[in-house]
Amino acid sequence: MVTDVFQEFEWRGLVHQVTDPELSKILRDQNLVVYAGFDPTAPSLTAAHLIQIIRLRWLQMAGHRPIAVAGGGTGLIGDPSGRDMERELLSQEQVAGNVDSIRGQLSAILDFEPGDTQALLVNNADWLTKLNLTDFLRDVGKHFSVNSMISKEAVKTRLTEREQGISFTEFSYLLLQAFDFLHLFDTQGCRMQIGGSDQWGNITAGVELIRRVRAETAYGLTCPLIEYEGRKMSKSEGTAVWLSPDMTSPYEFYQYWINTPDSQVSQFLRFFTFLEKQRIQELEGELAKDPAQREAQKVLAWEVTALVHGEAEAQRVRNASETLFDEEIAALDEPSLLEILAEAPTSDVPRSRLVDGVSLVDLLTETGLTPSKSAARTDISSGGAYVNNRREADPEHRVRAGDLLHDKYLVLRRGRKTYHLVRVV
């Protein structure tokens, strides 16, 4: 049980803007219903979405009830926030399919079991697609001046700094998200919305709408946008890491986190894990003392992968990662072997060539690992050539069928990190 979730957020750097300076006290004294929206314009959520899912889980552990809103309705419109051009509009069938596919990703972290803090997943298409246009303009649109809407950062940027401008479709997005907040206030008693700092304008619009039409107070809380090596972590920036194993394999997912730069790993431990403060500070101390060990990155990769894909899958990909450079690569199952070498160049060799054995010198040259046979002999003699991660020091060595992994693969390596996968056909 978290006793002071706002204080937890502050320590972790997860507070950027708040609509009420008393929100910290309110979260301590009251149990709120809180929602976050998730964009269903792809068949998977991304690592960038994780931050809101994790914040919802923190709030849930503090006694608040989380609602995840899949934007099946707003996804048909497209949010202009953080975009410098119009989004490609998806069909209702595409959006509905995407909503279905992200349900499991949310339930892996949020608790949907019955109880006072039971999480709820809703699709705003259920109410937005049933709106009557004239009623909506009369009951909602009249509360927003065009002047105030233009002043919102997401709209202002598109109007003043970009050539594309903004369509009326995207311009209306703010009204729809504000109506989401009002609808959830009326039907679920929801009084708080969270999001990234790029959602501030949309969140405050909902807070204002509830104040105007219900004379009630609602709250908003944003966190900083996340960057990875100086670039925004998002689909639009082409830096998305998907939560779906079909779009980013668990091994690639693990490698993404284990390759976190030293300058960011402390922040990511705070943002993306539920590790306690003392443990994170211990890892920060180890990082400062001996960064070459990369213990902080290893813990981060394990924690996030286990959170998203489960401990069994995290254990599998961690084992695969650790065996990439040692002889235990021969013990990997075939899917794991192919997964860790997915980015390695490959070539095919006829099985008939293995009957009398293939010269390792020839293989190194044919695969392009060495530029010539003389260079191959030099690499082998100097200890820089490996067959299935076993160093081979004999320039006359011949590779035979008995060397194959799973009776069809051969892993050649030159130096520390240059790999080539040979497939026997």
Image (spheres, helix red, strand yellow):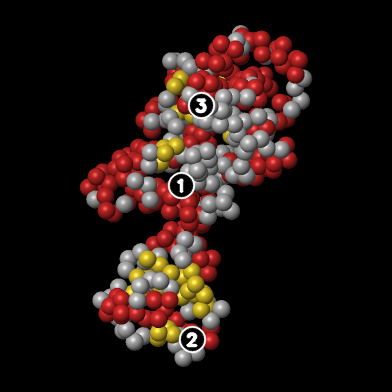
Q: CA distance from mark 2 to mark 1?
A: 43 Å
Q: Amino acid at mark 2?
A: Leu
**Closest to the observer, 213 or 130:** 130
Quick one: label 1 or label 3, which is nearer the N terminus?
Answer: 3
Residue 96 in percent (x, y) is at: 70, 39
| Disc 3 secondary structure class | loop
| Disc 2 secondary structure class | helix
In the picture, measured across the screen, residue 63 lies left or right of residue 256, that is: right
Q: Is residue 258 above or below residue 402?
A: above
Q: Amino acid at mark 1?
A: Val
Give the residue number, with chain letter if any, for mark 1.
Answer: 304
Residue 174 in percent (x, y) is at: 60, 21
Give the residue number, with chain letter if any, for mark 2.
Answer: 354
Quick one: label 2 or label 1, which is nearer the N terminus?
Answer: 1
For label 2, the crowd category at 10 Å Cα-Cα, with few meaning under 14, some 14 to 19 and many 20 or more, is some
Front position among marks 2 and 1: 2
Residue 86 in percent (x, y) is at: 59, 31
Q: Going by the picture, which residue comes out furthest to the front?
A: 163
Q: Is residue 297 above or below residue 234?
A: below
**Closest to the observer, 117 or 384:** 384
Residue 159 in percent (x, y) is at: 53, 21
For label 1, the crowd category at 10 Å Cα-Cα, with few meaning under 14, some 14 to 19 and many 20 or more, is many
Give the residue number, with chain letter if any, for mark 3.
Answer: 162
